[in-house]
Image (cartoon, rainbow, N blue to C red):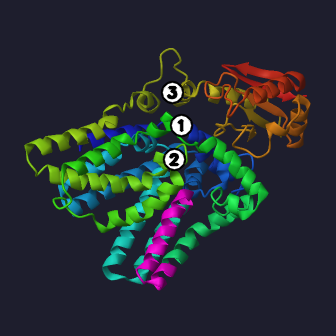
Amino acid sequence: AGLLAFAAVCALTDALAPPIQWDVRAYHLAIPELALRAGRFEALPWLLHSHWPHLMEALYALPLAAGRDSAAALLHLGAAVLLVVAVFATGRAAAGGAAGWTAALLLAAQPALSSEAGTAHCDAAAALLAFAAAGALARWDEDRRPRLAAFAGLLAGGAVATKLTLAAPLAAWTLWLGAKRRPRDAAVFAACAAAVCGPWLLKTWLETGDPIWPFLSSWTGDAAAAALAARNAVSNRWGFPPPAWALTLDGPGYLLLPCAAALALTTQGRRAPASAVERWLWAGGLPLAALALPQHAAWRYLMPLWPAFALAAGRAVASALKAGRARALAAAALVAAGALPIASLSPNNALFAVVAPRPSSAPEADRRALWEDRALGGLPRFERDARDVLPPGARVVLFREIRGYGAGFDYRWGDPMNQAILDYRRLADPEALAARLRSIGATFVLDHSGSSLYQEDPGYYDRRTLALMAQCLRRHGRVVLERDGFALYRLL
């Protein structure tokens, strides 16, 4: 309980601090900010992430409209807390208190959850909705009432509207309901799910030609959808065999290894049986795994399946604790190993932005803005200065930078992969790039040459693309602002 409380405090501190996470500033908060500016969710061909469903981002628009981006992070934190509590309650009901505490601790210790819980991401919310849908289906198993199938469908549809990859469990659950010879309930479940996620999938279809882009793009025959999918594949999918870093990204071993080892400590006959919730999670998790495993962030995309692993580990640990001293000690060691990521958490940096007094060296400075500037390498300060020199109606293309949230000016990504307005491979020379920039209405370019992430990479910012950008800016641009590795160019 103490470790869970510490993890919650760290996440709360992150939520109350200004958002500094890369994905949050690139699109999780940028998309609702752009929607507020436009008055609606628009097609953004220069931001491929905008084509997916964005239920949580739509909710984030509410606090953003009031100027409270911390409240958006608190919404996601609430979802993460509810998920951990729900797993605890399910584990305790299935196999006792030890099982519930073990499942909750192993789940909360997952690095991707503990680091994202207090941020305006969407993964914990999607996992919570999927878990709630599995719970409603478990209740349906008991009395087969259509209204429970309808409620489960609404929750499953909400999960898809939050994270598109959960279309795989939705399809699996629909088929499983039909396999139980309940076609009417399967139809009710699917219809209610479609009522929630259907509008988002229609939006994706109209923008890309594929309702679940990019997963069906090679089958639709739509060349534009296939081209977009190819760009997404380059930046988000690994080949085979996967690189070593893909196998350890987001710390899957902290859950998989304790789960596997705990199951090996006990026999199936000694363990409490899996709950109906856990079984429904596994039924939806296997097709989810098939969809997620080719992705770079595969383990994070599998977050809706983590509760099934945690519950299985909880049942095994509860059994091992009753199977003699040696097995009990081994089980305790496994839980301790799985909880190690919590011990490495520290709220100290974010605490400066939340409760620290004003620095004596700059008593007039806003501590939140000061911390945000330092955490983001001076990007917010440069954007503030850029707003002072940009004329009304300016449109800025971002080279080697995509974190546009809070920029305060009209911008477009110039990223080589994650947009569909600049295809550097088809631009013959710097003059062609300059002409293309003018054709999309660009008047300025913000280049983050000091970025440690966007350096030369054969599969991303390759040598030719970097040379094309540099020569274009040298011949067709003039520096109007430069600081801390950032430069703002006026296009001539």
Q: Secondary structure at mark 3?
A: helix
Pinpoint residue 156: horizontal percent, then vertical percent: 48, 67
Work out which quarter of the rendered image holds the N terminus and state it: top left
First of labels 3, 2 by sequence position = 2
- Name the front one of labels 3 and 1: 1
First of labels 2, 1 by sequence position = 1
Q: Is residue 190 above or below residue 105?
A: below
Amino acid on which the number 2 mark rests in the picture: His
Marks 2,1: beta carbons within 8 A: yes
Please tell me in which quadrant of the rendered image residue 308 appears. Answer: bottom left
Pinpoint residue 370: horizontal percent, then vertical percent: 54, 25
Q: Residue at label 1?
A: 21
Range drawn in magenta: 161-188
Q: Is residue 20 above or below residue 221?
A: above
The answer to whether residue 43 is seen in the rendering is: no
Q: Is residue 331 left or right of residue 122?
A: left
Q: Is residue 430 left or right of residue 452?
A: right
Q: Residue at label 3?
A: 367
Q: Residue at label 2?
A: 121
175 falls in the magenta region: yes
